[in-house]
Amino acid sequence: MPLMEPYRIKVVEPIPVTTRAQRAQALTRAGYNLFGLRADEVTIDLLTDSGTGALSAAQQAAAATGDESYAGATSFHRFREVVEDLTSYEHIYPVHQGRAAERVLFSTLLKPGQITLSNTHFDTTRANSELIGCEARDLPCPEAADLDSREPFKGNIDLAALEATLTGPDAGRVGLVIMTITNNGGGGQPVSMANLEAASRLCRQHGVPFFLDAGRFAENAWLVTRRDPDYADADPRDVARAAFRLADGCLASLKKDGIANIGGLLAMRDGDLARRCEVILTATEGFRTYGGLAGRDLAMLAQGLLEVTDPHYLRSREASAAHLADLVNAAGVDTVQPPGLHAVYLNAGRLLPHIPPERFPGHALACALYLEGGIRTVELGTLMLGKEGAQGEPVTAAPFELVRLALPRRVYTQSHLEYVAEVVGVVAKQATLVPGYRIVESPPILRHFNARLAPV
Ligand code: F0G
């Protein structure tokens, strides 16, 4: 597959080039927490693919036409038209970002003591379920546990476990089934259409609402066309349409496949549920035709949602991620297989066996990549997902110690990614010298954002 970005650069932004001494100083100041760095201390920023995409000329042109009317803006109607054509849902609400859709839907639909089921809840999705007093239960398919296996749809939900829960003693407590496409918490792996269909059928049989967490709907659709022979010739937009049709509604962070800097979506079929959501929406986000966004945001999102299913764009995104994974693998670092689209996940636990989970090997690798080459990544391991006791002693380690190299959309070129792979290779050669970390100061929840650490 040729690796050629199907766009050319029209506006450029210089990226900071720093010395090792500057990076060491920045890291110490930030308490060895990459969230504490200033962006101008980062050379290549792979912290997230959320809100970091590059706008197209057509999106910028659309922004200029943004209608900033409080109610009934033409930009809302344009946005609504594009979303309705894509999803087939009648009730469509913009919100400021994905987690706002989670809060509005969950606080309307769920009651304390209920259970939400998912292939894997994203961390804010879990937090919003738990804030209502619900239990967020992940049911990933068994293949997801083998990081090295090249099974095509490791983002699937475990259908047997789903059916067992919907028919077992907890059946009456299940308030919502939510499928994350692609499965970000599970390595950015796609969900197959057959899995979506079966999960949808089970939910219908048992009268449980079935929603998609669809932030990366286009990437999931593309991977379906690439990995399921039944869809080999399908248009990714049609595959996405078919996925939305299987659900009762969706929530989505449009900072991903909306290719915009801000925005989210809550949409559904049920008019009664929609009217109840609207009350919370109006009180906390904004009137139903803007939901906390500017008219120009809605205009850019409408255009971004059209561009994102372009097969040339999706093909090049797949090729970039695969190229980066190949280079990193050749440098001796294993990655979650097969690579998806939005990120490459490094297996830090395997690279740094001398660092035990309570010394945070993923975090250690992320710090080393910053020190070596100014690359900012995020740990998905015991620092983010593990739990500790009252005295700070480790209680549970995360199942895997990973570092996510998230790929912003249309931002970095092949040579940027080759630089990243080179830096990973240099760190891998000196892996035994990479130190572990201890927590010096930590907030009670979501500690990975604000904790201060020190090397040990
Ligand atoms: N669901 C998924 C699957 C996500 O990946 C995210 C955000 C959200 C919901 C929440 O959306 O940020 O717009 O409020 N993921 C980002 C990431 C932050 O880096 O993966 P949001």
Image: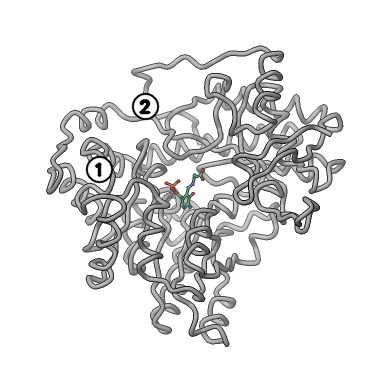
The label number, if any, that marks residue 302 in the structure image: 1
| Residue for point 40% across, 58% down | 103
Image: 158 above or below 419 = below
Q: Position of residue 298 (x, y in %)?
A: 24, 41
Which residue in the protein does label 2 denote? 7
Along the horizontal axis of the image, is 331 left or right of 270?
right
Residue 176 percent across, percent down from the top left: 44, 72
- In the image, 142 versus 171, the foreground residue is 171
**Circle 2 — which element?**
loop
Q: Label 1: how many residues lie within 10 Å, few (<14), some (14-19) or many (20+)?
A: many
Q: Earlier in the sequence, mark 1 or mark 2?
A: 2
Select label 1 or label 2 by which is in front: 1
CB of mark 1 within 8 Å of CB of mark 2?
Answer: no
Query: Where's residue 30, x and y in %?
Result: 65, 28
- Taking 316 as reference, is 383 above or below it? below
Q: Nearer the viewer, residue 233 or 142?
A: 142
Residue 307 % position (x, y): 31, 39
Q: Quadrant of residue 441?
A: top right
The amino acid pointed to by label 1 is Ala
Respond yes or no on whether mark 2 lies under 8 Å from ligand 1: no
- Please name the residue shown 69% across and 30% down the image: 31
